[in-house]
Amino acid sequence: MSPEQPSSHNGQSPFSRGRWAEPYISAASGLWTVHRWNPLTFTEQARNLVHTLTACDLGTLRRLMAQQDELADRVHQPHDRAPEQEGP
């Protein structure tokens, strides 16, 4: 695979590969670029998750991907409900 081109998922389900497609070097910008397999939900967008990441080098891109994955984990954790208050 050439780092200048995004790779296809070779018949595998995108869900079996995680959130991110294969990183590649953009011919237009020269930056390492990666896209999510699936579109963002409204909640993910509101919580600052992104569909595309770019970085000068692959190590930085991988760190940004990890940060987004941590944020996504927090966004998708079930929210604890506040205990219901009893009447007076």
Image: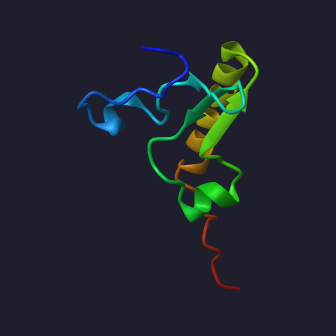
Horizontally, residue 76 falls left or right of residue 88, namely left
Q: Residue at x 42, y 14 (%)?
A: 1
Foreground of the two, 27 or 14: 27
Taking the image as shown, residue 31 lies to the left or right of residue 14, namely right
Residue at the extreme left of the image, as rendered: 11
Q: Residue at x 34, y 38 (%)?
A: 15
As drawn, the residue found furthest toward the right would be 56
In percent of width and height, residue 71 lies at 65, 40
The foreground one among 73 and 88 is 73
* Residue 14, image x, y percentages: 34, 37
Q: Position of residue 8 (x, y in %)?
A: 36, 30
The image quadrant where one finds the C terminus is bottom right
Query: Could you tell me if residue 83 is visible in this image?
Result: yes
Name the residue located 47 percent from the left edge and 28 percent from the top edge: 6
Does the rendering let one see residue 80? no
The furthest residue to the front: 28
At which x and y percent is residue 80?
A: 58, 56
Q: Quadrant of residue 64?
A: top right
Q: Is residue 13 above or below residue 31?
A: below
Check the image and name the residue furthest to the bottom: 88
